[in-house]
Image (tube, rainbow, N blue to C red):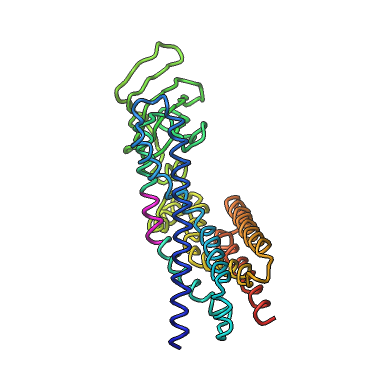
Amino acid sequence: MRVSLTLGRYFGMKFLTTVLAVFGGVVLLVILLDSVELMRRTASNENATAFLVIKLSFFRVPMMAERIMPFCVLVGAMSCYLGLSRRNELVVARAAGVSAWEFTAPAIIVALLLGVFATFVYNPVAAELQEQAKRYEAILFGQRNFGQQEAGFWVRQRSPDGQSIINAQSSQQQGMVLSGVTVFTFDQQGQYQDRIEAASAELKDGHWDLASARVYPADAPPSVHKTYALKTNISREQVQENFSTPETLPIWELPGYIKTAENAGLGAAGYRLQYHKLLSRPFLLAAMVLLAAAFSLRFARMGGVQKMVLGGVLSGFLLYVLSKITEDMSKTELLSPVTAAWAPVLVGGLTGFLVLLYQEDG
């Protein structure tokens, strides 16, 4: 038993250090590329110093890195097992009667713990840093937000004065504060009234508070206002539905938002999908370990290492494609969020388990 526990701790630490090294290397690479791209786009902006751009990149990258975490675990597990095979440590362990299940069990336990940490600690921190990144973007780049498409966000609202269409290039605080705002207003009969451009807008009780607004009426000269009140009957939940994205909400806030949105009669499929994706993350990381073990526990001296690596990478890519398909089907209400979130976990885990079962017990 002592030998098994010692080997388990050794294999678990090898897996952990390799995965952290892969994840750290990928994060540093993404920070470097993102910083270079931001510097290129802000070359003509005197306020965007190199330090502020790099700081902004540090705030943006954690959310990006969260999406590639499963593939870091896959690559890290494959690298760990291939390294053990090249050093003949797997041969010695096999000769001592250690099975493939004992090789993978420590890594699976570590992957589950990493998934729990990523879900309940890393995700809220990344979401908060993403909000800070949006504030930095608004300060440094004004109305322009490089994290969004040129079209930005659009929403139609009604008020006692008529209808209006709001376009915002970026949002903060889950849509409560908008930047780069353009508003088109119409009267009760649907006739165009005026266009309003503002640096920012903040939702208050019954109105939007527009800052540094310029109003262009249809039949009068334009006017400038330090603040301008635009009436609205839109609620906080409706604003979040239009301007916030599920990825920017930490897991602790998702259940309350889902309940509030459903009580308000709004669709919450995307947020329910994100919630179950976060809950399934520990098991997804464990499934990645099984897939990696299925393609990398073969002894290196037997050859075919390139094919094993290619097979593991291809399986990870196919699992990613499956997850994107299920997500899109869930967002179009063709598949339930629970099924969409857990299907890739089950497919990846069962595939790795069956391949290992065939290789080990044939």
**Main secondary-structure element of the magenta-colored stretch:** helix
Residue 188 rendering spot, x and y as whole percentages: 47, 26
Residue 190 in the image: state x and y as whole percent.
Answer: 51, 25
State left or right for residue 324 relative to residue 133: right
In the displayed image of the protein, which residue is found farthest to the left?
226
Q: Is residue 250 above or below residue 7?
A: above
Res 13 quadrant in image: bottom left
Q: Is residue 11 above or below residue 95?
A: above
> Is 183 left, or right, of 82 in this rendering?
left
20 or 219: which is nearer to us? Answer: 20
Residue at point 59%, 70% (across, down): 293
| Quadrant into which the N terminus falls | bottom left
Q: Quadrant location of residue 16? A: bottom left
Q: Is residue 125 magenta?
A: yes
Let me know if residue 64 is in the magenta part. no
* Quadrant (top left, top right, bottom left, bottom right) of the C terminus: bottom right
Q: Is residue 283 visible?
A: yes
Query: Residue 308: image x %, image y %?
Result: 66, 64
Does residue 208 appear in the picture of this structure? no
The one of 356 and 279 positioned closer to us in this rendering: 356
Please give the range of residues in magenta: 119-128
Counting labels gives 0
Percent across and percent down for residue 310 are 66, 59
> Residue 259: which quarter of the image?
bottom left
Location of residue 260 with respect to 158 vertically, above or below: below
260 or 124: nearer the eye? Answer: 124
